[in-house]
Amino acid sequence: MQKVVGIGGVFFRAKDPKALAGWYEDVLGVDINDRTWVQERGQTVFAPFRVDTDYFSRPEQQWMLCFRVNDLAAMLEQLRAAGITVHQQPEWNSEVGEFARIHDPEGNPIELWQPSDYSLGLM
């Protein structure tokens, strides 16, 4: 059986696509070159949620990006210094890692995840 081997793209609507792409590049370091981002090798979680979940912040929100980071504390310090509101709740953290949440300029939630050694299979 043939199977997919990874995420080939993330496509979503934006009021100002160019400005929003610039924000992702400037603030989060998503280095976009000719609309393609070469990311570090690592895990990608693929997890549909129940339609009535409150995990995405807003009931009408259909998706949420989750970016892996190497040092969540340093990333959050950088974001706060740039005037970006950071949300953290201790119950979001688990054996798979630490989590925080921000929103892009168009209000889309973005989860930031620092995987634990456990989730990386290092324990």
Image (cartoon, rainbow, N blue to C red):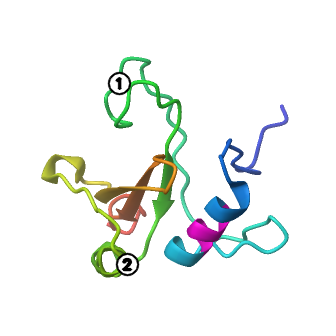
Q: Is residue 97 visible?
A: no
Q: Which residue is drawn at 55% across and 40% down?
A: 46
Q: Where is residue 88 in the image (x, y as percent from the top left)?
A: 22, 56
Q: Position of residue 39 (x, y in %)?
A: 65, 70
Q: Give the range drawn in magenta.
A: 21-25
Q: Where is residue 120 in the image (x, y as percent from the top left)?
A: 42, 63
Q: Name the residue under label 1.
A: 53
Q: Where is residue 107 in the image (x, y as percent from the top left)?
A: 46, 47
Q: Which of 74 and 41 is in front in this view?
A: 74
Q: Residue at x 79, y 66 (%)?
A: 36
Asked if the stretch drawn in magenta spans residue 23, the answer is: yes
Badge 2 local density, few (<14 within 10 Å), some, or many (20+)? few
Disc assigned to residue 82 = 2
Quarter of the rendering containing residue 22: bottom right
Q: Which amino acid does label 2 sit on?
A: Ala
Q: Nearer the viewer, residue 73 or 84?
A: 84
Q: Residue furthest front?
A: 15
Mark whose residue sits in front, 2 or 1? 2
Distance in Å between CA atoms under marks 2 and 1:
30 Å
Q: Quadrant of the C terminus?
A: bottom left
